[in-house]
Structures are given as C-alpha cells and as structure tokens.
Image (spheres, rainbow, N blue to C red):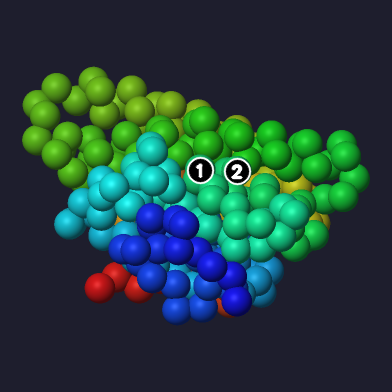
Amino acid sequence: MTDLSAFPINQKWPAQNPDVLQLYSLPTPNGVKISIMLEETGLAYEPHLVRFDTNDQMSPEFLSLNPNNKIPAILDPHGPGDKPLPLFESGAILIYLAEKTGKLLPADPAARYQTIQWVMFQMGGIGPMFGQVGFFHKFAGKEFEDKRPRDRYVAESRRLLSVLDQHLAGRDWIMGEDYTIADIATWPWVNNLLNFYEAGDLVGINDFANVKRVLKAFVERPAVTRGLSIPKRG
C-alpha cells in the first residue's frame, strides 16, 4: 500500500484508500471538471471536500499541495515512475489524466494540440470572464450602481460565446464527433453561467443555438450528472 504520510495534506484529509488518486475539490465549475473527467474515464479516486466557508483552501495542509490556494488539486499515488504526483490547475490535471488513461485526448499530434488549444481558450477566457459576470450579476457586484464593469464582462462573455457557437456549427462536440477534455473544461462553466449565476438572459443565450444544443448533450451524460455533485457538500 502506498505511503502518503510525507504529504501534509494527508493529515487534514486522511486517505481511506491511499492506493487510489486523491481529489481535493469543491463542486464548482473548475472543481467538477476533474470529478467529471474521473467519472468519464473510470479511474479509481477518493474525493475530499475543501470547504471555502471554513477557509480550508488557506490551511497549511492545502497550501502544501497548491500554493495558489485554489481548487481542484490531486495527489496521484501512482504518478510517473509509479511515484506520488501532486498536481494543481484544472487544465493541467485534465491533460495529465487524459494522458494517464489514454482517453479523451486524441493520439494524433495535430488533433491533440487543437484539443489543448480549446482547453486554453476556456482557461484564459471563458472561466475568468464568466466568473466576473457571476460576481457583478449575482454576488457583491450587483450592488454597484455603476454597471459599466458588469457590462464590460457581459460583452466579452457574449463574444466568447459567439466564438464557441460559430465553431460548433456542424459539430457534435468542440472537436467534432469526438468528446474530449475540451468539452469537460468548457461546459461546466457554460452550465454555471446559465444555472447558478442565472445570467442566461443577461448574455442573450438564446442567440447561441449551438451552445445550447451541445450543453444539453453534455449535462445528459451519466458521468457528467454524477460528477457535477462530487465532492458532496457537507
């Protein structure tokens, strides 16, 4: 059995089965990317809830794994060379898990990098911009009388949705017929924008028929249905 005692995070979130991948997360758009990926691939894992209401993400144990104090993070007891691998940043984790399992990332080099480019599109654009819309529309920002900050992020979110919508014309998924980590990276954020942030009308989602079509197919996948609520909130 793998010994994870050298990792401080194991003191706060003890592994019940240290031979399987340990997931430290919360069911937010970035967090569920990894639980969905793990459910899709069938890789054995153990989820641990990182509670923001008690500032778990700022604890020394969590910071020892991710100094950027963000979820998700993983500790794979069987990383490269069969040595434990700690890893943070959801995009990096998706690529790692795809390569580890040989699933959801094309083997063809050109298609592989094209898939990764759409993961980066989500990481650099969709995630940050949709998150700002959520802040200004649903959370503290909604009290601001000056709506220019909100409208700036709404306009950029609409632009990103337009890019995605045009790309999806005639395609089942972002990479065409094949469902990939580009979809797992992207659709939790679109789903969150419409449902949790309740910003569908604000961004004019009905203007983006292809986005709505593919989002529907995504949330109907059994692995997605399961992954969207992992880890369960305490």
Which residue carries the number 1 mark?
89
User: Could you tell me the amino acid type at mark 2?
Assistant: Ala
Total numbered labels placed on residues in the image:
2
Q: Nearer the viewer, residue 108 or 96?
A: 96
Q: Quadrant of the C terminus?
A: bottom left
Q: Is residue 211 visible?
A: no
Q: Nearer the viewer, residue 174 or 95?
A: 95
User: Could you tell me residue 110's position as x and y percent?
Assistant: 87, 37
The correct choice, above or below, for 124 with respect to 99 in the image is above
User: Could you tell me residue 135's position as x and y percent?
Assistant: 25, 39
Residue 7 in the figure: left or right of residue 211: left
SS for dot 2: helix
Q: Are marks 2 and 1 in contact (CB under 8 Å)?
A: yes
Q: Residue 7 occupies which quadrant of the picture?
A: bottom left
Q: CA distance from mark 2 to mark 1?
A: 5 Å
Instruction: Residue at 29% x, 26% y: name it.
Output: 151
Instruction: Residue at 78% x, 36% y: name it.
Output: 113
Which residue carries the number 2 mark?
92
SS for dot 1: loop
User: Could you tell me the amino acid type at mark 1?
Assistant: Glu
Q: Nearer the viewer, residue 111 or 214?
A: 111
Dot 2 crowding, Cα within 10 Å, few <14, some 14–19, many 20+ = some
